[in-house]
Amino acid sequence: KKTKTGIGFKKRDQAIVINKISEGSLFSGTDLQVGYECLSVNGQTIRDPKHALKIVMDSIGEVTLIACSGGPRPQGTAVTIVKKKSGDYKPGLWFRPLNKVLVRISDIDESGPFANTSLRPGDVCLSINNTLITDPGTASQAMKRAEGLVAMLYFSLTALRENAVEKIFLDENRKPCVVTWLNEDLCTVKSASGGLINITLRFHEDGTCEDVAPWKNMFSRDEDAAEGEDTIIHLHWYNKHIDHRIQQLNKILMNNMTFLERSMKTTDSGSPDEADKLMQNLTRLADMHRKKLLTIEEFTAAKAKLFAL
């Protein structure tokens, strides 16, 4: 390592990016470019530009810098970096397809190198050491080929769902509801103040969610109501209110899923007008599926036709 590093870093949004590479310096003959996001130096996650520069300056011998090309990574994505021993073919990760272009982490071995990272079952794996991941086989091969540091770019589908549910579902006093996750695809939502909201949401791999028992409150009664007087009108308003919230939630989920799917495509994504039209059609299909007008098979087939256009 030379005395002068010949590299500079700055903070852009929430990312640490390379803003200078001096000609003739240690890094000038590498694939690094100005604008790339610095993910780690010598296996250490970067906190700020000064931290990145200090690690480089304090390094003796080889300096390993992992960066994300194309500038800061897309919003909602995260990077986890682990060390993999030479010849170790058991990273403790299992993959399964989410759809034709996205791959999901199905399980994480508690004794594996990814156990103590921010990665969680249900997250979407986007790339491994700059290899684009579009199927489980590619993910497994990329893990086998990796030596030393392994950098995985992923989208936290679990965090997206958690944040969206907490944002959308407020109780009668405008306070966040109590959300309990039974697994990455199922949660209960209840009023924090013991109010009316009490639903169970199931999340589907097509990007939508639904109340698994939307009829469950239709036969409830108001204890203060006169004998023989039911509360169908009140409950109709309640179910309509919940239905509207689920529509809002599905819109957020579909927007993010569409972004991920299109970002993994190698073909041109089309003009802004075409993208808007696609989003409108996807939202309409999701609404039809939620209302049971389309089966899951019909919804998946229709969505595939839209992306093929």
Image (cartoon, rainbow, N blue to C red):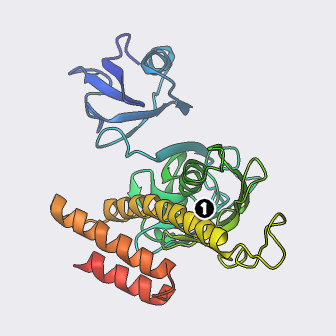
Q: Is residue 15 above or below residue 159?
A: above
Residue 225 on image: x %, y %:
79, 68
- Total marks shown come to 1
Residue visible at 72% across and 77% down in the picture: 216
Look at the image and tell me in which quarter the C terminus lies.
bottom left
Quadrant in the picture for the N terminus: top left
* Amino acid beneath label 1: Gly
Which x, y percent locates residue 270? Answer: 17, 64
Q: Residue at x 59, y 43 (%)?
A: 82
* Rendered position, 18 above or below 53: below
Classify residue 17 by image quadrant: top left
Q: Residue furthest front?
A: 226
Q: Residue at x 76, y 76 (%)?
A: 229
Q: Is residue 193 above or below residue 7?
A: below
Left or right: 97, with 201 as reference point: left
Q: Nearer the viewer, residue 157 or 69?
A: 157
Position in image of residue 19 (x %, y %): 28, 24
Q: Position of residue 226 (x, y in %)?
A: 81, 71
Check the image and name the residue furthest to the top.
3
Say which of 89 and 99 sits in front: 99
| Residue 212 can be seen in this image | no
Q: For the residue labelled by badge 1, is the local secondary structure a helix, a strand or a loop?
A: loop
- The residue nearer to you, when weighing 236 against 13, is 236
The residue lying at 74 percent from left, 48 percent from top is: 192
Query: Is residue 4 among what the camera can see?
Result: yes
* Residue receiving disc 1: 122
Front one among 18 and 87: 18
As displayed, is residue 282 above or below residue 81? below
Q: Residues within 10 Å of mark 1 (few under 14, many from 20)?
A: many
